[in-house]
Amino acid sequence: MQDVLQHLINGISYGSIYALIALGYTMVYGILQMINFAHAEVYMMGSYASFYAAKWLGIENSPGLSTLAILLLTSMISCSILSLAIERFAYRPLRKAPKINSLITAIGVSLLLQFLAQLFFGAQPRAFPTVLENQTLWTFGEVALKTSDVTVFGVSILAMLGLHYLIYHTKTGQAMRAVSANPTSASLMGINVNRTIAATFVVGSSLAGVGSVLVGMRYPKIDPLMGMMIGLKAFVAAVLGGIGSTMGAVLGGLIMGVSEEFVAGYLSSTLRDAIAFGLLIGILLLKPTGLFGRATSEKV
Amino acid sequence: MTRDAVFKVENLQVSYGPIQALKGLDFEVKRGEIVSLIGGNGAGKTTTLRALSGIVESQGRIFFCGTDISTMEAPSRVGLGISQSPEGRGIFPQMSVLENLSLGAYLRNNKVEIADDLEKCFALFPRIRERAKQVAGTLSGGEQQMLAICRCLMSRPKVLLLDEPSMGLAPLIVSQIFKIIVSLNQEGMTVLLVEQNARMALKIAHRAYVLETGRIVMTGTGAELLSNDSVRRAYLGI
């Protein structure tokens, strides 16, 4: 019973990171019907941005809330700028081209960033700065609740609540939903479609930026290919939840995190990655639209 | 140029890839008029509206109340007072009726005026008031068309561009919608109407243009065209 609880804590903690990254995939898909494969590399670049910022500011070894805040901000801003550039120069020129063109471009951008990172940052792994001291906050028998778990969960929840507020209670969010439903109608309402798409990229990649700091806190080792596996899993989480649905991405991420943790804990840790892709195959077979896949209620 | 021309269009051309959909149209819409564009499938009626609202690229010149708007983006044209209800209505099916209406007022900031206009819309379309909280995709076709027109009105337009408001609707609903168009016009709204239902469109129009494969082939008052033999044969099935 106790290790069930421990696995659950770990699973939710890691799952909320998957959820943050999955949100970026799902939001861009929702608005452009395109899988932004470069998202995982934006996440990776966020880690490096924090890494270099910490080094430059000399706060690599001074854990604390201010470090957390600085790194979060650095990472979010760097990810936003990078993804704005990708959107502007790689995707926007292809907006009227067939979808497959932007998909291939996304894969290209993803590879480009991976290799640029190897070229400039080196291929060897680096140690992520210490963000917070990892203390045990609470124990119950063998179950331990650590600072990192609470922080990861807390920060993720805050980010998701912020996202929810943005999407459902602001004009920008309203514009995002309108463009995602029907770009032509949206521009007939006076909505600037390009600006709204850019805003979506900023929001999605900021969440990836948050994710990169949280992962760095739990697994303080970064390298230029670190985005690949977590990106794929977050993508699967987005598909599991129903791509295009923000609620689905959150739930998909949590399911992914928890089930991985339980498989690793009770079956074998080598099966951890297999579960992700097993889930993907399962969903595609049983419910291709995912848990919250959009039901079409449109009357024509 | 006469000051009371809401739209004055010169040599309007639109191409979709290699296909030229509009081959140089000249027409105008004066303040307070209902102008109808009629013609068969593929004549270029919808394309004309899309060019006026800026959601397709066009060549030639479009003047709106005297200003050249030919190169202006669609959202800025909405700000000037051009509001289009697109073909197929283009409502946001997942959002509530109220939210659709608030999107109509997207560019406006004065909450008091917006609330005022919402009241006016509700007065004009009591059905929309009843459905305000409902998800727009669950409305009937006629209600969706009413919503689309309401949504246009929420931007306080100077001109309404209506694309096939009768499409897919029962005759009774169609005549209701047309009555509303006429009453909006009587209150001063300028309307440019595109219709397959040529009889209805000509009946309420002050003037009309007949389009054929991207060109204007005939023009006149609604009554003139209604009694014109070739129009009767080609579009009214008589």
Image: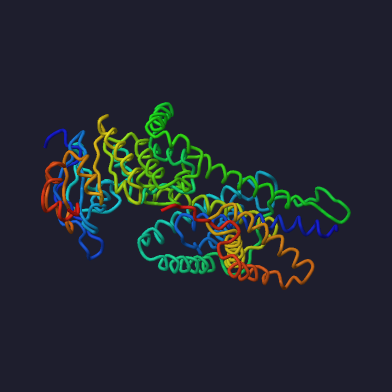
Which image quarter: residue B42? bottom left
Is residue A230 or residue B124 the one in the foreground?
Answer: B124
Measured as percent of width and height from the top left, residue A38 is found at 50, 63
Measured as percent of width and height from the top left, residue B221 is found at 13, 41
Is residue B138 or residue A71 the one in the foreground?
Answer: B138
Answer whether residue A23 is visible to the viewer in this image.
yes
Residue found at x 64% / y 58%: A253
Is B160 left, or right, of A257 in this rendering? Answer: left
Is residue B219 or residue A189 the one in the foreground?
Answer: B219
Measured as percent of width and height from the top left, residue A64 is found at 70, 46
Residue found at x 20% / y 48%: B37
Is residue A95 or residue A225 the one in the foreground?
Answer: A95
Is A187 left, or right, of A263 in this rendering? Answer: left
Taking A171 as reference, is B186 above or below it?
above
Q: Tell me how many marks there are.
A: 0
Answer whether residue A227 is visible to the viewer in this image.
no
Is B226 left, or right, of A136 in this rendering? Answer: left
Residue found at x 58% / y 61%: A290
Residue at the right extreme, as displayed? A141
Measured as percent of width and height from the top left, residue B11 is found at 14, 51
